[in-house]
Amino acid sequence: MTEYGLILAGGGARGSYQLGVWKALQEMNIKIAAVAGTSVGAINGAIFAQKDFELAKRVWENIDYDVIFDFALFDAEKRSKMSFQEKIDYVKNIIKNRGLDTHALKVLLSQNIDEEKIRKSDIFYGLVTFSLTDMKPIVKYIDEIPEGKLVEYIMASAAFPLFQDHIVDDKLYVDGGVYDNVPVSVLADKGFNNLIVVELSAIGRVKKVDTEGLNIITVKNTNPGGVLQYEKEQVHTNMKTGYLDTLKAFGKVKGIRYYLSYHEDSFSGWYEIPKQEEYGRWMTDMEMVNRQGKPDGFMIYRMLRRLKNYCGTNFDEVSGFVAAMEITADILKVDRLKVYTIPTLADAILGKYKEVIQDTSDDNPMKEIADLLWKPKKVGKYRRQSLKSIIMEKMDSGKQKILFTGNPDLLIANLFLYMLLFRRKDRESV
């Protein structure tokens, strides 16, 4: 079995995403031999080395930034009750105290990080911080950290500049993110060639690393919340995203923004990819539809360019179909944080579509989109026409042409909905 080193980036509250990664790795039976982190990645990495997922989950679900950081300006309710002068005085007091008090954070870590377990663990541990005293980065491995000092060095790695000075053995430290927020080299330098790198899309320097000879699987946060959003709901969203992004990174699910489980035989019946000769040409040679500035041709060109950009380098009939499906789901705000099959995502799209067009209230948040979507009764009119004719006849006003040229996602969504409604046996009841 391949063993991996796990790299955990810094990113404040986004660190809960790494628990979702951990859950997915457990389910896939991925063997982790070492873990290294910066800032919140160093905190999570320590608990990871303890092999106590439930502890980490419990800590994240019950964390309260208002207690840990004692910073009223983070809290909208408290902030709204403070006068302008009170806010100024509050900030002045923080400056006077040389940053936010992190005593509560230290207590939390001391209560939950078991240094003895980490030292005995078969998961090797390392972290990154930066010494302001020596003006140089400090990489510390578990076997180099003095007994009883582990929490101190984890705090040093997570010493955000807004915090009070963190001193260990008469040396002043600051958050390791100022040197390397995604510390690949920490484990690469120890000979770990198979690495899982978990990025949080947070601010911080990323040190360039020679990746020759390294097998790197990158898990990148596709739905980053704020670095200070510790609310329970956001923690759960982060964890769910981390879990799904990891499944995708290991090829267990497909898709760009959504998470799809499908095989080639999924594309039959309702979901059969259109075989029109003209459609096939458009999907494979976009230049053929760029009609030297003619509005209709340019509209089609914009649509296909959007599909191609969405797919990236892998643009063909299948990927174009899936891209159109995802874009339609996104337009209708279909929940993306779950695994879909092609039929279940189609059902979710049609369900949302039904909600949108049936809600005629003025406060419908999607009313503007609803007015631009085809209605079921119009579908039969186009059943024997080519895709080009469908596009042209739908664009029956200059206003619509402008809207769809400026927002090709709406045109893609309309065409995809047309296809689903036309093929669906019970479309008249939708």
Image: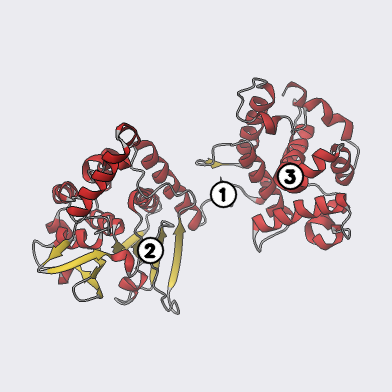
Instruction: Locate residue 278 relative to residue 322 in the image: left or right.
Output: right
- Neighbour class for label 2 at 10 Å: few (<14), some, many (≥20)? some
Q: Is residue 125 visible?
A: no
Q: Secondary structure at mark 1?
A: loop
Name the image quarter holding residue 385: top right
**Could you tell me the amino acid type at mark 1?**
Arg
Name the image quarter holding residue 131: bottom left
Label located before the other in sequence (3 or 2): 2
Residue marked by disc 2: 204
**Could you tell me the amino acid type at mark 3?**
Ile
Instruction: Locate residue 276 relative to residue 135 in the image: left or right.
Output: right
Q: How far across and how far down the image is residue 394, in percent?
A: 85, 37
- Neighbour class for label 3 at 10 Å: few (<14), some, many (≥20)? many
Q: Residue at x 68, y 32 (%)?
A: 368
Q: Name the quarter where the N terminus is drawn.
A: bottom left
Q: Nearer the viewer, mark 2 or mark 1?
A: 2
Q: Secondary structure at mark 3?
A: helix
The disc label shown at residue 257, or none: 1
Residue marked by disc 3: 412
**Could you tell me the amino acid type at mark 2?**
Gly
Q: Compared with residue 369, is residue 261 higher up or lower down, i.e. above or below?
A: below
Q: Secondary structure at mark 2?
A: loop
Q: Nearer the viewer, residue 368 or 140?
A: 368
Label located before the other in sequence (2 or 1): 2
Q: Name the quarter where the C terminus is drawn.
A: top right
